[in-house]
Amino acid sequence: MHRRPGLSARLKLALSYAGFLAVAGALLLAVVWVFLLRYVPDNSQGLLGISPNRYLLVHTFAPAAAVAMAFLLVFGLVGGWVLAGRMLAPLTQITAAARTAGSGSLSHRIGMEGRQDEFRELADAFDTMLEQLESHVAEQQRFAANASHELRTPLAISQTLLDVARRDPTRDRGELIERLQAVNTRAIGLTEALLLLSRSDRGTFTRGSVDLSLVAEEAAETLLPLAEQRGITLDVTGGTAPTSGSAELLLRMVTNLVQNAVVHNLPAGGTVTVRTAARHDASVLRVENTGPPVPAELVPTLTEPFRRATERVRTDEHAGVGLGLALVHSIVRAHGGTLELVPRAAGGLVVTVRLPEADGSGPDGG
């Protein structure tokens, strides 16, 4: 944005200092006049014939006062310029860092030294912002690279299948169509997940009243056949947990959590427990499952896009696209909540979602 040039902050401060000194000097002269010179007799004999009269005092004092006022003005300008330069030096550092960040370099930090003051707080806040921006940009770059890789894989497989069919016209077309359909279904699922992730990140959704207990029951009912097929016991308990948000996104969040809990479980005889409650002005959803041990150092990475627990890649019909917990984390964040992942000592994972409780909620769900 183009703006007309104006006075610098340093010059404004210098002029302010000089003006303050000039006003202070004028007030001092006024005090001298009010409380001293006005009581001196104004006659040719002076006070008792031995003291100078007002006329002589004024004409003697006025030149010295004018010189003092001029000195104060010059001193105020010079001193104000120097002091303003020293005071605004940290602001110059912050401005230089902002210009460096504006050019695309987010690795620069101000690192201001000295005691805590307003400029130090501003510099520390700016460094924190740069750190978060750098982390966010790096995360987006990794996400773009991973998304490109994930989308490239089904396209490359499709191309390979088509090349094989072109070179071998006698190949079974039914098998080719079936494999192409599977690859295409995976690509469509990945694309839809990416769009949903982008939508939740932007927070562009309509909010309404949602009960997490009803959402959990709906998700469990949908995934019950999958749990029975794998020999997993699926249990949904707890009380009402009202919150405000998108029913569609919250259903996708709970569905992803329950599906992950079912898929990443024991081969048989495992359990998945879903519990909802309203506690301390928050609606809580807790999903706990048995399963293989999850290393503690791997837990913080599970919410990153395209990361899979224990780095295994599934090949069955519920392979997923590596966006399950990343999408859950994005939806929770868009609804102003928190997501906590804790590995169970016996194996498996405990996932706790806390969302702001809706107004007019019912009693504690337990």
Image: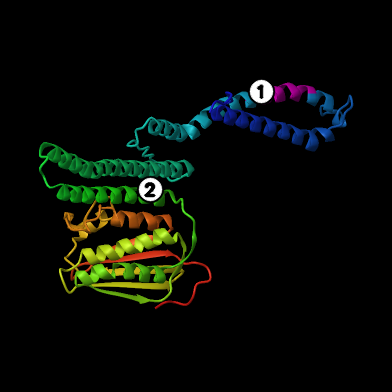
Which class describes the residues within 10 Å of circle 1: few (<14), some (14-19), or many (20+)?
some
- Which is nearer the eye, 247 or 329? 247
- Residue 365 sits above or below residue 25 on the image: below
Please tell me whether residue 103 belongs to the stretch shown in magenta: no
- Residue 196 sits above or below residue 46 on the image: below
- Which is nearer the eye, 51 or 111? 111
Give how far across and how far down residue 169 sits, in percent: 12, 40
Give how far across and how far down residue 307 sits, in percent: 23, 52
As shown in the figure, which amino acid type bears the numbered disc 1? Ala
Q: Confirm or deny contact between disc 1 and disc 2 (CB under 8 A).
A: no
On screen, residue 191 versus residue 14, left or right, reads left
Which class describes the residues within 10 Å of circle 2: few (<14), some (14-19), or many (20+)?
some
Please tell me whether residue 60 belongs to the stretch shown in magenta: yes
Is residue 229 in view from this perspective? yes
Q: Quadrant of residue 315?
A: bottom left
For the stretch drawn in magenta, what is the main secondary structure? helix
Question: Considering the image in quadrants, where does the C terminus appear?
Answer: bottom left
Secondary structure category for the residue under label 2: helix
Residues in magenta, as a range: 59-71
On screen, residue 33 versus residue 137, left or right, reads right
Where is mark 2, residue-wise?
198
Q: Quadrant of residue 111?
A: top left
Q: Quadrant of residue 49?
A: top right
Give how far across and how far down residue 29 sits, in percent: 74, 32
Give how far across and how far down residue 83 sits, in percent: 52, 31
The furthest residue to the front: 170
Q: Earlier in the sequence, mark 1 or mark 2?
A: 1
As shown in the figure, which amino acid type bears the numbered disc 2? Ser
Is residue 53 in view from this perspective? no
On screen, residue 67 versus residue 321, left or right, reads right
Where is mark 1, residue-wise?
70
